[in-house]
Image (cartoon, rainbow, N blue to C red):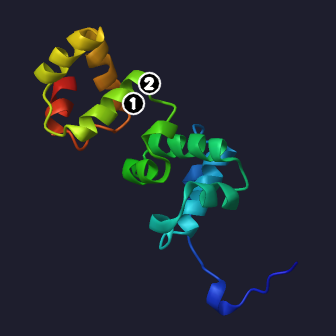
Amino acid sequence: MTTEITPGNVRNFTVSTEIFYNPSLDIYSQMIYIVLSSSTADTASLTLDEVAKKGRMTTKLAIKAMQSLVDEQLIPHKLFRKMIGEFQDDRLSWAAKGLLTYCKEHKEITLAELLTLSDQSGEDEQSIRKALMELERNGYLEEFPELSRLTS
């Protein structure tokens, strides 16, 4: 099967060559960066599966590659979260994922309230703070300014 390239479906784009000299980025991260850069107008509507397919890799490799790009601040964390969701981010422990899920349903929760709830679950203050720091480090507390201040 051949695909004819017509002027209507050709897109020119520019990618900084810096990504090829960044030792933190593997070939998969570089390819995902190229895929996302070439789809800038469509990036908001791209799915993770589409990005992986265009990058000729598995979904799991695409997620890891995107995590590297977020860590290097080459793509925004919001785009990453939108495309993969919290539960596919393997940088987060189950404790952090559970805490994030709870916080999303209780947006105005305070640390004092979390600690009160932790007494019911058997978690101690240290565990709660550790999960909060994990969420902060990976960019998940942007929408929770009250909790974000506590990790500083």
Question: x and y percent of residue 67 in the render?
Answer: 51, 41
The residue nearer to you, when weighing 15 against 120, is: 120
94 displayed left or right of 31: left
Question: x and y percent of residue 57 in the render?
Answer: 71, 50
Q: Is residue 43 above or below residue 84?
A: below
Which quarter of the rendering shows the C terminus?
Answer: top left
Please give the residue where the numbered disc 2 appears in the rendered image.
94
Q: Quadrant of residue 50?
A: bottom right
| SS for dot 2 | helix
Q: Quadrant of residue 97?
A: top left
Question: x and y percent of residue 107 in the render?
Answer: 18, 40
Q: Residue furthest front?
A: 120
Residue sitting at x 65%, y 42%: 61
Q: Is residue 55 above or below residue 145?
A: below
Q: Is residue 20 visible?
A: no
143 displayed left or right of 30: left
Q: Amino acid at mark 1?
A: Lys
Tell me how far mark 1 sits from mark 2, CA to CA: 5 Å
Q: Quadrant of residue 60?
A: top right
| SS for dot 1 | helix
Which quarter of the rendering shows the N terminus?
Answer: bottom right
Please give the residue where the numbered disc 1 appears in the rendered image.
97
Label 1 environment density (alpha carbons within 10 Å; few <14, some 14–19, many ≥20): many
Residue sitting at x 11%, y 20%: 112
Question: x and y percent of residue 58 in the render?
Answer: 70, 47
Residue sitting at x 58%, y 40%: 64
Q: Amino acid at mark 2?
A: Trp
- Mark 1 in CB contact with mark 2 (< 8 angstroms): yes
